[in-house]
Amino acid sequence: MDTTQCIQTRRSIRKYKPDPIDHTLLESIISTASYSPSWKNTQITRYIAIEDSSILKKIADDYTPSYNSNIVSQLSMLVAVTMVKGRSGFERDGSYSTKKGDRWQMFDAGIACQSFCLAAHESGLGTVIMGIFDEDGIRNLLNIPEEQELAALIAVGYPDISPEPPKRKTVSELLTYK
């Protein structure tokens, strides 16, 4: 699969088969995602693979709204994506490099999430990035270190659906020349 085909055929998957994901496959996906660009090559993105059914149930029941809970409750694996705080967008003295302040860290985590999802798609897995959840509850449940911040949850598994692509905006709607 070439890059264009991978980007154009990847979909957000919300229905999964119960099949477990081999650790070697996940590690290959993480290895690929590790090549994502980041602010001054800070490589701040970290991943927590959640397979324990009791933790998945707790996240589904207590820490996500129903539309995300319905996804989490069918997974054999959920990936919590964290980012190391205080590096991306900062100078060595701790000051911000731009007016965007610490928002660069979310930009870097977003690039890594997209790389993760594309690598997973190429490997035959489906994903959907979820951003609405009880951040403090999940942080405590997973014992995320204080120097990291929870950026997103990625549902990952073997797709049980093949959704059609949503309507795309035209290039003329997206592009302006000056």
Image (cartoon, rainbow, N blue to C red):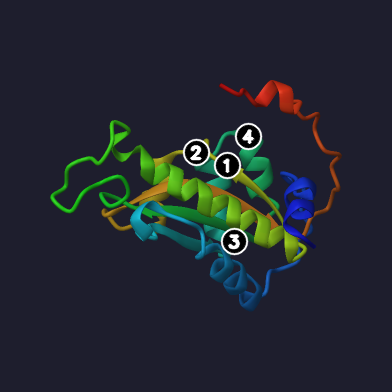
Mark 1 vs mark 3, foreground winner is: 1
Return the disc, 4 or 2, that comes first in the chain's sequence: 4
Q: Residue at x 60, y 24 (%)?
A: 177
- State the residue position of label 2: 133
Q: How many marks?
A: 4
* Along the viewing direction, whichever of 134 and 116 lies nearer the viewer: 116
Work out how far the residue at label 1 is from the one at label 2, CA to CA, in angstroms. 8 Å
Work out whether residue 123 can be spotted: yes
Query: What amino acid is labelled 4 in the image?
Result: Ser
- State the residue position of label 3: 53
Q: Which mark is residue 66?
A: 4
Work out how far the residue at label 2 is from the one at label 3, CA to CA, in angstroms. 18 Å
Residue 166: x and y in percent read 80, 32
Work out how far the residue at label 1 is from the one at label 3, CA to CA, in angstroms. 19 Å
Q: Residue at x 66, y 62 (%)?
A: 119
Category of crowding for the residue at label 2, using alpha-carbon neighbours closer than 10 angstroms: few (below 14), some (14–19), many (at least 20) = some
Locate residue 88 relative to residue 175 in the image: left or right. Answer: left
Work out how far the residue at label 3 is from the one at label 4, CA to CA, in angstroms. 18 Å
Query: What amino acid is labelled 2 in the image?
Result: Phe
Mark 1 vs mark 2, foreground winner is: 1
* Along the viewing direction, whichever of 178 and 35 lies nearer the viewer: 178
Return the disc, 2 or 3, that comes first in the chain's sequence: 3
Above or below, comparing residue 50 to residue 97 in the picture: below
Q: Residue at x 51, y 46 (%)?
A: 110
Label 1 with label 2: CB-CB less than 8 Å: yes
Query: What amino acid is labelled 3 in the image?
Result: Ser
Element type where label 1 sits in the image? strand
Above or below, comparing residue 27 to residue 170 in the picture: below
Q: Residue at x 53, y 38 (%)?
A: 131
Residue extending furthest toward the bottom: 24
Work out how far the residue at label 4 is from the one at label 2, CA to CA, in angstroms. 10 Å
